[in-house]
């Protein structure tokens, strides 16, 4: 096809003057007719080639085709109740069509007076990666290629520099000697660079501190992915593949509903669970109890107590993102008030 | 209005007139652009998985080319400054060619951004919830589109005046020229801020990025212009004045010196400090943990730049334009590697979590990039094709002379300087 056009172009480029004694206008309308034919031939060839070039578009799956409904859907923050309901119905239909299962999909709002934080006990974590897989199962991530929100680093003793960590450790048993394990996921930063850079406000921080993404609004520029200091974001480079039997039908708009290709996603602290009083999936599965989660605004909550009493640090404090994800050790500070009281006595 | 449409129609018609070489050239570019379009359709259907990008290296050749081309576009005004500030009349017409080059470059930039998007079908969200002024990307959108308009206006107006045999009015040109100068610097600065504002990426998070962008752009852009003007000179009757090329040559040389100086500053800061932040620079120049895909590239680039700089400094490139051409081509390629792949990819290696994953563009991705380049060159060719007969008075509102199939680029003496009212 392409060659044809080329030939058209070439043959058309013989100038009238070079073809014969027709120059000088003595041949009446001949050159015009010929040039007209020539032009049409070139135009037709060009058009045909362009059509051929567009051919792969025929293979676009029906659910990936842009529709008026999707085109007109508003930004999450601008939708009123009815509009949200329409969007949820559409999504529900799409899911049902693809997975033969009617999902329970809702838009779950943050609770008042709640700010979630996560605390992870480095003394206890053994690097078994159970959290990684529970997360994938809970949040309907693509299985091929597998998208994982949690990355567990195997760290040599004596350093917290992640560049020394091993991402792909693969021993028959964990933990291995001389190592400790550091799981990393979205830190739900209080000063999140990923939110700052997004050109379309497709990602923002909610009242309970969770940074969410409107998958129907993201344009897939991956600027947030470049901006995140914890490598917490994942992009759907192809259409996410999720076997029908693996679908988790309990889902919400801002978290674990199936994503289209071409948008980013990340950990949402399982907001469809945690906003209803449950614990995140990664916490529930952890065999060592290394993971603690809760409301930091409640001084009696376990996480508040940990932040108060245990030796705590955040990863990459110098980038100023103010994470809501803390690492801690079993060891506690000396119970300061009593210690002081002892001394003075 | 009707007259203007007629002007556009005539320009359209004129863009297809030319000799067999011209047609072959257009056909060649058209075919490559179509191959690129075909590759893009494939990417649209299967997603960005058709590229070599990963979650680890999430930007690749598209953004690399985009970054480089912003520089090319910005540097077109480096011609404007000598003309309008130092009144170097010999460059007067070249300004128009420089600005048209900017138009083509900006269009390529925009195309490179669009092909990089995961959801181009949702691009209109940009207009509905424009995250301005927080997101620097929105600044870039304004800067690039504004610059495109400015650069369409200035040469467009001058050409339309020449077509109408009117003298252009000063007030419609000069203020815009000065805005364009400031704007050109801003598009480059804003593009540099896209990267240097990210605390997550120490390789980019440096104040020297913006000045280095400017310096390398002001070397690569005029170098490209020299090559382009030499082509015009070769393929048409139009003689570009030697003095013009030599003025460009000194711009390139000075800019290249500044660029090399800033590179030295960067090296010193990275390698002397030798903190953990040096990892990306090590990966780029020396290789890290046995991974060194970029090392041969950056070394080639460095060698090309050094040789080019030497040729530019030696008097031989003043006497022999062929040497100048070679130097410019080397420099253009050198900076393309350095500013494109050499800047974007190492920012992602190692990742913020210390993983080292390399990036190699796929065939599909390469075809799309080539397609966009072909499209840009096609646009530029056609723009030049229209401009020359108009400026030389062969295509005006009451005269439309064709000269058979030959390229009717004007002779030097036909090109009179632009006079303002
Ligand atoms: S960890 Fe990354 S993705 Fe999560 S809020 Fe912080 S910057 Fe954003
Ligand atoms: S990829 Fe999506 S969420 Fe991330 S910056 Fe771009 S539009 Fe925003």
Image (tube, helix red, strand yellow):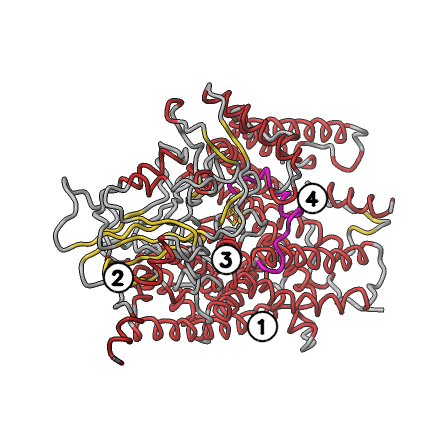
Q: Nearer the viewer, residue B175 or B210?
A: B210
Q: What residue lies at 60% left-to-right and 72% top-to-bottom?
A: B243
Q: Pointer 4: what residue?
A: B15
Q: In which quarter of the image is residue A99?
A: top left
- For disc 4, the neighbor class at 10 Å (few under 14, some 14 to 19, many from 20) is some
Q: Pointer 2: what residue?
A: A160
Chain holding disc 3 = B
Left or right, residue A5 beside residue A187: right
- SS class of the residue under badge 4? loop
Q: Pointer 3: what residue?
A: B68
- SS class of the residue under badge 2? loop
- For disc 1, the neighbor class at 10 Å (few under 14, some 14 to 19, many from 20) is some
Disc number for residue B247: 1
Furthest residue in direction bottom, as rendered: A344
**Precedes in sequence: disc 3 or disc 4:** 4
- For disc 2, the neighbor class at 10 Å (few under 14, some 14 to 19, many from 20) is some
Q: Nearer the viewer, residue B157 or B40?
A: B40
């Amino acid at each position: 096809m392409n060659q044809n056009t080329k030939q058209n172009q070439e043959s058309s480029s013989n100038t009238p003057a070079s073809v014969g004694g027709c120059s000088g206008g003595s041949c009446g309308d001949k050159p015009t007719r010929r040039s007209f034919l020539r032009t049409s031939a070139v135009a037709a060839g060009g058009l045909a080639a362009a059509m051929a070039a567009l051919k792969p578009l025929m293979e676009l799956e029906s659910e990936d085709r842009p529709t008026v409904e999707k085109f007109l859907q508003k930004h999450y923050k601008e939708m009123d109740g009815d509009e949200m309901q329409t969007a949820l119905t559409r999504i529900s239909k799409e899911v049902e069509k693809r997975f033969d299962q009617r999902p329970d999909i809702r838009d779950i709002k943050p609770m008042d007076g709640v700010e979630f934080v996560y605390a992870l006990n480095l003394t206890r974590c053994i690097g078994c990666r159970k959290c990684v897989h529970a997360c994938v199962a809970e949040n309907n991530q693509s299985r091929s290629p597998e998208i994982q929100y949690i990355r567990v680093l195997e760290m040599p003793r004596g350093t917290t520099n992640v560049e020394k960590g091993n991402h792909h450790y693969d021993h028959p048993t964990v933990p291995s000697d001389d190592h400790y394990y550091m799981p990393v996921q979205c830190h739900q930063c209080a000063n999140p660079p990923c939110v700052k850079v997004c050109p379309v406000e497709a990602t923002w921080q909610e009242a309970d501190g969770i940074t969410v993404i409107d998958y129907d609004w993201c344009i897939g520029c991956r600027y947030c992915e470049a901006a995140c200091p914890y490598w917490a974001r994942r992009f759907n480079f192809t259409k996410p593949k999720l076997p029908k039997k693996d679908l988790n039908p309990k889902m919400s708009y801002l978290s674990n509903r199936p994503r289209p290709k071409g948008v980013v996603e990340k950990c949402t602290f399982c907001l469809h669970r945690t906003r209803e009083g449950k614990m995140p999936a990664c916490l529930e599965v952890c065999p060592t109890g290394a993971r603690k989660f809760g409301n930091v605004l409640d001084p009696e909550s376990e996480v508040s107590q940990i932040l108060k009493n245990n030796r705590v640090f955040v990863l990459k404090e110098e980038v100023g993102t103010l994470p809501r994800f803390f690492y801690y050790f079993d060891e506690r500070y000396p119970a300061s008030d009593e210690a002081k009281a002892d001394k003075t006595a | 209005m009707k007259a203007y449409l007629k002007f556009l129609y005539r320009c359209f018609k004129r863009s297809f007139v030319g000799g067999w070489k011209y047609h072959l050239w257009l056909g060649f570019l058209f075919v490559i652009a179509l191959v690129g379009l075909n590759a893009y359709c494939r990417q649209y259907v299967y997603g960005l998985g058709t590229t070599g990008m990963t979650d680890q290296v999430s930007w690749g050749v598209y953004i690399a080319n985009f970054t480089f081309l912003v520089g090319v576009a910005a540097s077109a005004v480096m011609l404007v400054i000598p003309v309008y500030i130092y009144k170097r009349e010999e460059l007067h017409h070249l300004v128009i060619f420089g600005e048209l080059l900017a138009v083509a470059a900006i269009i390529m930039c925009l195309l490179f951004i669009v092909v990089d998007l995961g959801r181009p079908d949702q691009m209109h969200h940009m207009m509905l919830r424009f995250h301005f002024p927080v997101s620097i990307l929105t600044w870039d959108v304004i800067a690039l589109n504004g610059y495109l308009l400015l650069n369409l206006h200035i040469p467009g107006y001058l050409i339309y005046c020449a077509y109408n045999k009117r003298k252009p009015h000063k007030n419609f040109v000069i203020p815009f020229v000065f805005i364009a100068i400031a704007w050109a610097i801003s598009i480059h600065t804003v593009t540099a801020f896209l990267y240097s504002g990210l605390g997550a990426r120490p390789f980019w998070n440096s104040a020297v990025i913006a000045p280095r962008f400017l310096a390398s752009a002001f070397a690569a852009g005029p170098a490209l212009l020299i090559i382009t003007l030499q082509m015009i000179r070769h393929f048409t009757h139009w003689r570009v004045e030697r003095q013009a090329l030599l003025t460009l040559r000194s711009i390139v040389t000075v800019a290249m010196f500044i660029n090399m100086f800033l590179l030295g500053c960067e090296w010193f800061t990275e390698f002397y400090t030798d903190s953990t932040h040096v990892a990306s620079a090590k990966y780029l120049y020396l290789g890290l943990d046995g991974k060194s895909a970029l090392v041969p590239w950056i070394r080639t680039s460095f060698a090309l730049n050094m040789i080019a700089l030497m040729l530019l400094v030696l008097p031989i490139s003043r006497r022999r334009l062929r040497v100048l051409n070679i130097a410019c081509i080397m420099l253009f390629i050198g900076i393309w590697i350095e500013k494109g792949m050499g800047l974007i990819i190492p920012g992602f290696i190692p990742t913020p979590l210390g993983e080292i994953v390399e990036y190699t563009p796929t065939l599909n991705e390469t075809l799309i990039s080539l397609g966009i380049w072909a499209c840009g060159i096609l646009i530029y060719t056609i723009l030049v094709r229209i401009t020359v007969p108009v400026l030389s008075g062969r295509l005006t509102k009451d005269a439309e002379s064709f000269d058979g199939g030959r390229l009717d680029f004007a002779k030097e003496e036909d090109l009179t300087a632009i006079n303002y009212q």
